Image: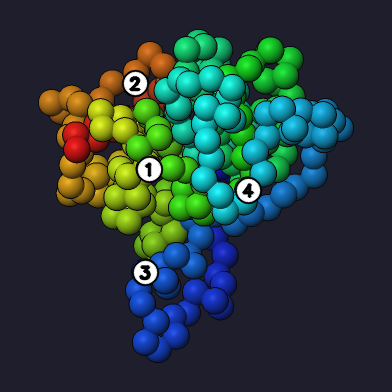
Amino acid sequence: MTDQETPQVDENEVPKEGQEEQKYMRKIRSFVKREGRMTNRQQTATDTLWESMGITYKEEMLDFTEVFGRDAPVVLEIGFGMGKSLIEMALNAPEKNFLGIEVHGPGVGACLADAGEAGVTNLRVMNHDAIEVLEHMIPNESLSTFQLYFPDPWHKARHNKRRIVNETFIENMRHKLVVGGLVHMATDWEPYAVHMLEVISSATDYKNTVETDYAPRPDWRPLTKFEGRGQRLGHGVWDLLFERIS
């Protein structure tokens, strides 16, 4: 998701007099949807695999047992990019169901193509705004794990309001998790890591799963080529792993 996001000002973001702040904030997107051009491989995968692996957005709660054809813990990832890490996780944890949401169409196509070639059966994908999906399609207490890896940090102060991690988002995420479910976030931008930690630490009914502020990278989160290169150059990555306690 990060690579496809660029700042953009929308006149609709200007609040009308008397409008509630929550409604105003809801209109601020944490991304700008830029489709780009699909390769033939990505388009073919979308055309042939969407019926079996894709979920089209509609304002109706999902039945995950029906979606996956079985009852198993559901892992939701927002912003999977081209999907390589998500596919690796799904292959490494066949006992779990994985749902990925991504706004970049070619990324979704690439994920479908690679998943099809790898024979992944426990993965479904969506191409839509994750906030709307959470609100209208994800039932409360239906997720075992929520993953948000390397979201756009919106570095400039005037764009900070676009960060997907805020008080409302973290509270909404809590309702979607089962008690004991995990929120796992990671970023390579330290100021955003501090922001994430402040937001979730101040939220109710969460606890940090480690005694330090940040957790070591769990085995289940694959090390990306970008991340590995950054580590060799001395760049940091910060993982946060919090549990819903009630």
Residue type, numbered disc 4: Tyr
Q: CA distance from mark 4 to mark 1?
A: 17 Å
Q: CA distance from mark 2 to mark 3?
A: 34 Å
Name the one closer to the observer, 51 or 32: 51
Identify residue for label 2: 217
Q: Neighbour class for label 1 at 10 Å: few (<14), some, many (≥20)?
A: some
Identify residue for label 3: 22
SS of the residue at dot 1? loop
Q: Earlier in the sequence, mark 1 or mark 2?
A: 1
Q: Is residue 228 above or below residue 21?
A: above
Toward which corner of the image does residue 182 lie, by quadrant? top left
Q: Residue at x 36, y 69 (%)?
A: 22
Q: Earlier in the sequence, mark 1 or mark 3?
A: 3
Please identify, in this view, whether the residue under mark 4 or under mark 3 is nearer the observer. 4
Residue 227 percent location from the top left of the image:
47, 25
Identify residue for label 4: 57
Q: CA distance from mark 4 to mark 2?
A: 32 Å
* Residues at marks 4 and 3 touching, judged by CB atoms closer than 8 Å: no
Identify residue for label 1: 140
Please identify, in this view, whether the residue under mark 1 or under mark 3 is nearer the observer. 1
